[in-house]
Amino acid sequence: MENTVKQRLIDYIDYKKINKNRFEVEAGLSKRYVSNIEKSIQPDKIKKISLAFPDLNTGWLLTGEGEMIKKTIHNDVMEGTVKERLMAFLRYENIGQNAFEKKVGWSNGYINNIKSSIGSDKISSIIKEYPLLNIEWLLTGKGEMIKQPIHNDVEAVPEDKYIMAEYADLRSFAGRLGGSDIEQLPETHKRLLPREYEKGNYLVVRVSGDSMNDGTSRSLCDGDEVLVRELAPSEWETLPIRNRLFIITSRGGNVLKQIKEVNKEERYIVCHSFNNAFEDFTLSFDDIYQIFVIYKIVQKQIRLE
């Protein structure tokens, strides 16, 4: 078997169990880009691939040296550079590079120019806007990306910057989600989150099962936690289905799905799974209790391939 950049990329695509077209779409590459590779891959294309597939070792891709997949060390140390970890945090926050730089008061393009570390003034500006980011993780890779809220009486959490959201586990909940008195819930049934969005009924929901796991970077897997907001029934006919995922509670149970179609006339939605082992199905509006739109991933389980 030939050992070229093109063949190594095809080997990685096979490893991810996706086809070339899916890879090209997720990486923002033109159709048949992979098939048309001749000798190497341009730096701008490498950047796109690296952002869409952060587990791919681009050094291996370009040279054939080392391992195909970046490894995460078992003693809670994440390999990589400060710049790579910062980019991982941006993906976690679902915020673009330019928007992040503007929010923390950095010059446009600062992240692209990070060489080895970040100055103390830049660290201070991050902490001001993102107090839950674990700075030790950012600088060294040790520990978790997000600090765990400390429940003690040392310092009150400012109400204008945080919200307390109810926590629900799709493994154990049937029927409607939310609606409990947050003050009466035990600590294990609520989560402290930055106040980033408009008012509404927000929940943190634990994903159950692997119907939305197709092995790609877009997957939501068993054990992941997501922040969701309930949509009023008046919003169902105009659901923002493009590039969105939803949690739906209904008479048939509670599911996390992509909604492919909203039929206003016959009043039903078509639900789709990323995992091809699960078939599409329809749900009538009359059988639906609630629809929640997913806003962001709160916690993602670490998986070693």
Image (tube, grey):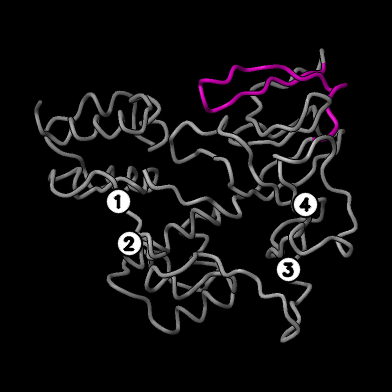
Residue type marked 1: Lys
Q: Which mark is residue 162?
A: 3
Residue type marked 4: Tyr
Q: Is mark 2 on a helix, strand or loop?
A: loop
In the rendered view, tell whether residue 88 sits above or below residue 282: below
Q: Residue at x 52, y 74 (%)?
A: 126
Counting residues from the N terminus, which is met first, the one under dot 4 or under dot 3?
3
Counting residues from the N terminus, which is met first, the one under dot 1 or under dot 2?
1
State the quadrant of the C terminus: top left
Name the residue at the bottom extreme. Answer: 154
Question: Are the residues tagged 1 and 2 within 8 Å (C-beta)?
Answer: yes
- Which is nearer the eye, 51 or 2? 2
The magenta-colored residue range is 267-290
Residue that numbered label 1 is attached to? 70
Name the residue at the top extreme. Answer: 266
Counting residues from the N terminus, which is met first, the one under dot 1 or under dot 4?
1
Task: Give the alpha-carbon distance from disc 4 to disc 2, as whole Å.
Answer: 34 Å
Residue that numbered label 4 is attached to? 202
Residue that numbered label 2 is attached to? 79
Please state which of the two labelled residues, at mark 4 or mark 2, is closer to the viewer: 2
Q: What element carries label 4?
A: strand
Q: Position of residue 213 (x, y in %)?
A: 51, 34
In the rendered view, tell whether residue 55 sits above or below residue 289: below
For mark 1, does the 10 Å Cα neighbourhood hold few (<14), some (14 to 19), or many (20 or more) residues?
some
Image-based side of 225 in relation to 51, left or right: right
Task: Give the alpha-carbon distance from disc 2 to disc 3, as whole Å.
Answer: 31 Å
Q: Which residue is drawn at 52% across and 20% down?
A: 277
Q: Position of residue 246 (x, y in %)?
A: 68, 36
Q: What element carries label 1?
A: loop
Q: Does the magenta stretch include residue 280?
A: yes
Task: Give the alpha-carbon distance from disc 4 to disc 3, as whole Å.
Answer: 12 Å
- Which is nearer the eye, 238 or 246? 246
